[in-house]
Amino acid sequence: MQDRWYGDNRDLVKWGTLLELARIYRAKQILQVLYYRPNTWDPIEVGGSLVRIPNEVIQHFRNSMSICKMKTSVPIKVLGKTIADRNQYLQYVIGEVQKRKTIKKIVFLDPDTGIEPQGPPGLQHVLEGELDAIWNSLSEQDVLVLYQHKTGMNNNDFIQPKLQQFVNAIGIEAARAKYAHAPTFNTANDVAFFYATKE
């Protein structure tokens, strides 16, 4: 995830969904796996001079780590390490999940786009093998949640094909996977959240 996307309507739907899932499943922690990729910000022109946007402005409006400060009944922990090497990042995530083996948690995978496409994946995607490895690292009753953005598919139904890909990647029966979305929420109707409970 990049900071430039933080704080839009999709975040309202995202965190509304996650807190509702935490309530339903009685989770004691939400562990957000950010797949973080830092941004650079273009300068602004003030009085004919180009100046950098002050860091405090960026920190206030576009700091994806600031979700930890939200007052809620369930603590939120963000894994905000920059993703550069996929294998090292996966080992880091699995290590952080396993540190919390005794905590009933939601592990929320939050890449920019979602599960890998049919074409070459980038750092904005979660690979199927990574999904499987993270799923296998969960404790019983943990919930795995994946952010999925609408793909470039010609039809409007991106949810069902991607949900099936999610199911196949973690090797569960289709009936065990569910999804959340906001089809009428302005500018956030192009995202879904796939989830399943580890049994």
Image (cartoon, rainbow, N blue to C red):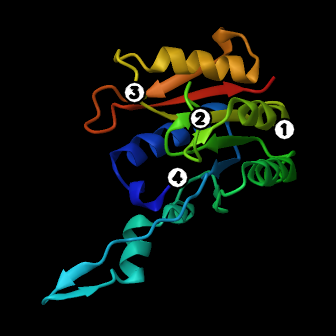
Q: Nearer the viewer, mark 2 or mark 4?
A: 4
Q: CA distance from mark 3 to mark 4?
A: 19 Å
Give the camera-side residue of 82 and 140: 82
The residue indicated by pointer 4 is 1
Task: Give the image quarter of residue 60.
Answer: bottom left
Q: What amino acid is at disc 3?
A: Gly
Does 25 sit above or below residue 73? above
The residue indicated by pointer 1 is 137
Residue 93 in the image, given as x and y percentages of width and height = 76, 50
Q: What amino acid is at disc 2?
A: Leu
Q: Residue at x 64, y 62 (%)?
A: 82
Q: Which numbered disc covers residue 146?
A: 2
Horizontal side of residue 49 vs 10, given as left or right: left
- N-terminal of the pair, mark 3 or mark 1, is 1
Q: Residue at x 54, y 40 (%)?
A: 18
Task: Give the image quarter of residue 22.
Answer: top right
Q: CA distance from mark 3 to mark 2?
A: 18 Å
Does 197 sit above or below residue 110? above
Q: Secondary structure at mark 4?
A: loop
Q: Residue at x 65, y 50 (%)?
A: 33
The residue indicated by pointer 3 is 152
Q: Residue at x 36, y 83 (%)?
A: 54
Give the camera-side residue of 59 and 126: 126
- N-terminal of the pair, mark 1 or mark 4, is 4
- N-terminal of the pair, mark 3 or mark 2, is 2
Q: CA distance from mark 2 to mark 4?
A: 13 Å
